Amino acid sequence: MDFQLVDNFFNFNDYNILILGGNSGFGLEILKSFSNYKNEIIIVGRDQKKIDKAKNEVKKINSKRNIFSIKSNLKNENDVKKLFGKIKKNKFNREIKI
């Protein structure tokens, strides 16, 4: 496969990136890996303290990185509705990749 094609396939610049469970484990590592792309990052987690800690870890990698965070329990239907409401309300102006 042509390297250019692969590079374009994995190009996450100019997208909104939604990371569910981005405050720990695999989600946190994904969050860190996107810290230097030119995009908006939205992380969702259940624990605000862990969300804040994850944001601080990313700031160590890229101090200019702005991360939009939403506290939400995806097992709760009302929280899921609020999550999508917050995303819609903030009018992210680019396509969202999950």
Image (tube, rainbow, N blue to C red):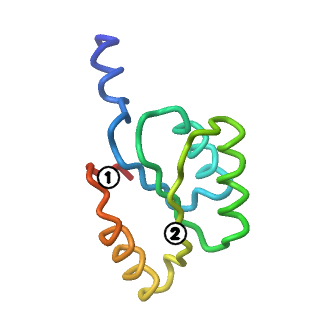
Nearer-N-terminus badge (1/2): 2
Q: Is residue 49 left or right of residue 94?
A: right
Helix, strand or loop for disc 1: strand
Is 24 placed above or below 39 here?
A: below
Residue 36 x, y percent position in the rendering: 53, 32
Near-viewer residue (44 or 74)? 44
Residue 58 x, y percent position in the rendering: 65, 44
- Disc sitting over residue 96 in the figure: 1
- The image quadrant of residue 32 is top right
Point 52% across, 38% down: residue: 34
Looking at the rendered structure, the kind of residue marked 1 is Ile
Is 98 placed above or below 33 here?
A: below
Point 71% across, 46% down: residue: 57
Residue under label 2:
70
Q: Are marks 1 and 2 in contact (CB under 8 Å)?
A: no
Residue 28 x, y percent position in the rendering: 63, 50
Q: How many marks?
A: 2
Q: Is residue 63 left or right of residue 14?
A: right
Looking at the rendered structure, the kind of residue marked 2 is Ile
Near-viewer residue (55 or 47)? 55
Point 63% across, 43% down: residue: 29
Q: Give the class, few, some or many, for how many residues have Cα within 10 Å of label 2's Cα (few <14, many ≥20).
A: some
Residue sitting at the far bottom: 78
